[in-house]
Image (cartoon, rainbow, N blue to C red):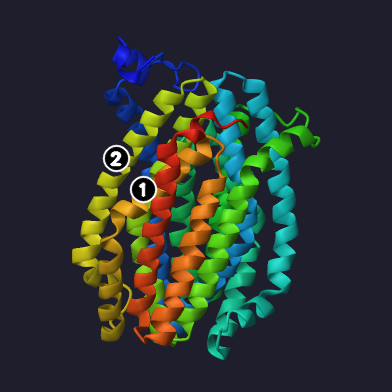
């Protein structure tokens, strides 16, 4: 049956009645699809902007400590994200399977996936904490940090290592809730957590309210506290509130290797994708670091501001994953495809607004971080480059989310290998090291990466083969 042959007769039943998780209309028109896509995307979008805003406030506060402090945090975040990228195998597989089972109205199987994900996340977090804490100096030296940055970076990494178990648990719990269609709870958790992060930064970085001034280490402590707060809220909702997937500690948490195999079959390509992405970004950062502390600080500030543009893509990507997963679970591949298209359209509109903001006002936003004229001017050029490729950036984020919802996680991996290593790293080396274009050359390489990844992802989506992917 074609998409336009039949529409929902009562819009209120669809938009305000039973959850989309448990009642899927036979056929939806584009208006209804956009409404559902936006209702799922809005909490995630607000969440992403909140994360972006808090990240900006974090960087602004740390920026008051000087370029070395900014560089230290940047050199910690890249290797930590690289290590945690392995955990993406669990979160992506969890969201895809929970969404598919919810769409098929198989609640027991969805709960089994949730319990297995929680157990693995706790184990992973406990293992990761001592590794990051003990080997912080070695990791920072491998990043090429100079002595001043090294001392600050080690202190920061050790403090955020303490919050790692809560970080990965929150990631798993958020993946479970998003797969069930609940985007609001992760938003609420992040609002509370990020407010605590800002307050903790103010108190611990600068020594307010009787606390000692801990500088960069204080920022790390505040981050770990915020991650504990987020995980506690998500855990409470999933175990104590009336949710579609309400869990109980009395249920079985023994390893179910059949379920774990299904989770990782979907998630391993995504884990490899994240590993390839983070490894490429780390290599890219090493190239930028060769330009000196000022250039690297400029890069960190510009990347922080750039999050205003890619956060909408990530938010709508989450909505696309949930919609596509649930609709394919309900055996509605044509509606799943149209849902992805409409979600992409909405995401590009919002990303366009962000692009306009950073293109014309990026210079003034940079002034919130620093009064260094060289940093301000370099940042303005970098931000204008990235603003111009927003259609490609939104496309690759959102349609990759749709493919993940279908369980087709291989092509996002392929696109990342080609884009990150074939474009970002290779072209950055050519533009920076050979042509001598400096930081501008590095950001041109970022732009090429986004364009190429969008081309690969769009080609796979257009083929339609993902609609019949078995998981």
Q: CA distance from mark 1 to mark 2?
A: 9 Å
Q: Is residue 281 left or right of residue 335?
A: right
x%, y% of residue 291? 43, 86
Compared across the picture, whether 245 is left or right of 349 comes to right
The picture places residue 105, in percent across and down from the top left corner, at 57, 18
Asked if disc 1 and disc 2 are in contact, CB closer than 8 Å, the reply is: no
**Mark 2 neighbour density, 10 Å: few (under 14) some (14–19) many (20 or more):** some
Extreme residue toward the bottom, this view: 147
Quadrant in which residue 343 is drawn: top left
From the viewer's perspective, tell me whether residue 465 is left or right of residue 251: left
The circle drawn on residue 70 is none
Helix, strand or loop for disc 2: helix
What residue occupies the far top of the structure in this picture? 9
Q: Residues within 10 Å of mark 1 (few under 14, many from 20)?
A: many
Q: Secondary structure at mark 1?
A: helix
The residue lying toward the viewer, choosing from 58 and 436, is 436
The residue labelled by disc 2 is 345
Q: Quadrant of residue 346?
A: top left
Tell me which label, 1 or 2, sits earlier in the chain.
2
Identify the mark at residue 395; answer none if there is no mark.
1
Question: In the picture shown, does residue 468 fall above or below 62?
Answer: above
Residue occupying image coordinates x 44% and y 22%? 20
Among all residues in the image, which is located at the extreme left?
Answer: 360
**251 vs 346: above or below:** above
> In which quadrant is the C terminus drawn?
top right
Which residue is depicted at the point 27% across and 61% down? 387
Q: Quadrant of the N terminus?
A: top left
Locate residue 341, reporting x and y percent: 34, 35
């Amino acid at each position: 049956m074609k998409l336009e042959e039949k529409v929902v007769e009562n819009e209120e039943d669809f938009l305000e009645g039973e959850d989309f998780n448990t009642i899927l209309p036979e056929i939806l028109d584009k208006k209804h699809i956009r409404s559902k896509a936006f209702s799922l995307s809005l909490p995630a979008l607000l969440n992403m902007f909140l994360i972006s805003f808090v990240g900006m406030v974090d960087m602004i506060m740390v920026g008051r400590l000087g370029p070395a402090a900014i560089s230290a945090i940047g050199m910690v975040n890249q290797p930590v994200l690289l290590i945690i990228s392995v955990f993406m195998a669990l979160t992506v597989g969890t969201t895809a399977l929970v969404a598919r089972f919810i769409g098929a109205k198989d609640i027991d199987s969805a709960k089994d996936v949730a319990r297995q994900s929680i157990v693995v996340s706790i184990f992973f977090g406990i293992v990761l904490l001592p590794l990051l804490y003990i080997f912080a100096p070695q990791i920072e030296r491998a990043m090429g940090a100079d002595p001043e940055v090294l001392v600050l970076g080690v202190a920061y990494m050790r403090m955020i290592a303490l919050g790692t178990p809560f970080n990965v648990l929150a990631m798993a719990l958020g993946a479970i809730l998003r797969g069930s269609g609940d985007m609001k709870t992760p938003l609420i958790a992040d609002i509370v957590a990020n407010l605590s992060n800002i307050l903790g930064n103010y108190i611990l970085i600068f020594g307010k309210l009787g606390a000692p001034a801990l500088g960069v280490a204080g920022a790390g402590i505040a981050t770990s506290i915020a991650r504990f707060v987020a995980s506690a809220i998500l855990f409470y909702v999933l175990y104590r509130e009336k949710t579609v997937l309400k869990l109980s500690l009395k249920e079985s948490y023994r390893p179910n290797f059949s379920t774990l195999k299904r989770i990782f079959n979907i998630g391993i390509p995504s884990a490899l994708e994240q590993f390839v992405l983070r490894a490429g970004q780390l290599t890219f950062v090493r190239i930028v670091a060769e330009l000196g502390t000022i250039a690297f600080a400029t890069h960190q500030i510009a990347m922080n501001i750039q999050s205003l543009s890619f956060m909408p893509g990530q938010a709508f990507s989450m909505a696309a994953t949930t919609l596509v997963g649930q609709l394919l679970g309900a055996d509605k591949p044509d509606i799943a495809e149209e849902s992805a298209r409409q979600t992409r359209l909405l995401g590009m509109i919002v990303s366009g607004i962000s692009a306009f903001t950073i293109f014309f006002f990026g210079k003034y936003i940079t002034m919130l971080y620093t009064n260094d004229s060289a940093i301000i001017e370099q940042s303005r050029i970098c931000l204008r480059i990235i603003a111009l490729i927003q259609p490609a950036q939104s496309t690759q984020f959102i349609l990759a989310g749709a493919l993940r919802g279908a369980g087709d996680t291989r092509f996002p991996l392929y696109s990342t290998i080609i884009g990150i290593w074939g474009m970002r790293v290779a072209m950055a080396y050519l533009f920076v090291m050979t042509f001598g274009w400096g930081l501008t050359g590095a950001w041109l390489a970022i732009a090429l990466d986004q364009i190429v990844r969008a081309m690969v992802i769009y080609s796979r989506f257009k083929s339609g083969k993902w609609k019949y992917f078995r998981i």
